[in-house]
């Protein structure tokens, strides 16, 4: 193919591509960001005589169990509303010592499980080892 024919074809392609983008400009794509509303809670983990506190934002409608999963490494027996916490951040509640992880909401022992309790804005959720 001669250089003149090749240059002509290249020129026609460039003009055609430029014309295409002039006639059909790229449409602006707007992403829809739906920010999920959140609430603020405080989580306290008590192990022996030490306590760690964290203020956390969690999605509205989250359970105490979901909030705990978000902020700490945990192990459970069962799932969802039937979940029973067996370890938080590597601290296992020892069956031999008759220990369990107790769950408190605003200073009072919870009357429902962590997988059932829906956290509310400014709740203080506390987890601590107790014996039976």
Image (cartoon, helix red, strand yellow):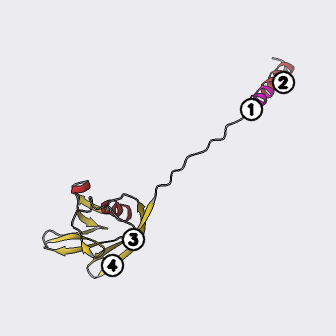
| Residue at which label 1 appears | 21
Location of residue 104 in the rendering, given as x and y in whole percent from the top left corner: 26, 72
User: From mark 3 to mark 4, how far is it between C-alphas?
Assistant: 19 Å
User: From mark 2 to mark 1, how far is it between C-alphas?
Assistant: 21 Å
In the figure, 75 relative to 50: above or below? above
Q: Secondary structure at mark 2?
A: helix
In the figure, 82 relative to 95: above or below? above
Q: Secondary structure at mark 1?
A: helix
**Nearer the viewer's eye, disc 2 or disc 1?**
1
Structural crowding at the residue carrying mark 3, measured as other residues with C-alpha within 10 Å and reported as few (<14), some (14–19) or many (≥20): some
Marks 3 and 4 in Cβ contact (< 8 Å): no
**Sequence order check, earlier mark of 1 and 3:** 1
Q: Nearer the viewer, residue 65 or 60?
A: 60
Q: Nearer the viewer, residue 96 or 132?
A: 132
Q: Nearer the viewer, residue 2 or 23?
A: 23
**Nearer the viewer's eye, disc 3 or disc 4?**
3
Residue 122 marker: 3
User: From mark 1 to mark 4, how far is it between C-alphas?
Assistant: 62 Å
Location of residue 4 in the rendering, given as x and y in whole percent from the top left corner: 87, 20
| Residue at which label 2 appears | 7
Quarter of the image holding residue 27?
top right
Quarter of the image holding residue 96?
bottom left
Structural crowding at the residue carrying mark 1, measured as other residues with C-alpha within 10 Å and reported as few (<14), some (14–19) or many (≥20): few
**Nearer the viewer's eye, disc 3 or disc 2?**
3
Structural crowding at the residue carrying mark 4, measured as other residues with C-alpha within 10 Å and reported as few (<14), some (14–19) or many (≥20): few
Residue 16 in magenta stretch = yes
User: From mark 3 to mark 2, how far is it between C-alphas?
Assistant: 71 Å
User: From mark 1 to mark 3, how far is it between C-alphas?
Assistant: 54 Å
| Residue at which label 4 appears | 51
User: From mark 4 to mark 2, how far is it between C-alphas?
Assistant: 76 Å
């Amino acid at each position: 193919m001669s250089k003149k024919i090749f240059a002509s074809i290249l020129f026609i392609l460039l003009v055609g591509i430029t014309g295409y983008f002039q006639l059909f400009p790229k449409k602006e794509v707007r992403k829809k960001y739906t920010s999920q509303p959140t609430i603020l809670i405080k989580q306290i983990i008590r192990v022996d005589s030490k306590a760690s506190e964290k203020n956390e934002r969690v999605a509205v409608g989250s359970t105490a169990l979901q909030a705990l999963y978000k902020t700490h490494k945990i192990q459970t027996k069962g799932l969802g509303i039937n979940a029973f916490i067996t370890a938080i951040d590597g601290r296992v509640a020892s069956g031999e010592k008759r220990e369990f992880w107790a769950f408190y909401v605003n200073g009072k022992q919870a009357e429902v499980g962590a997988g059932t309790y829906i956290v509310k804005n400014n709740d203080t959720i506390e987890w601590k080892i107790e014996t039976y």
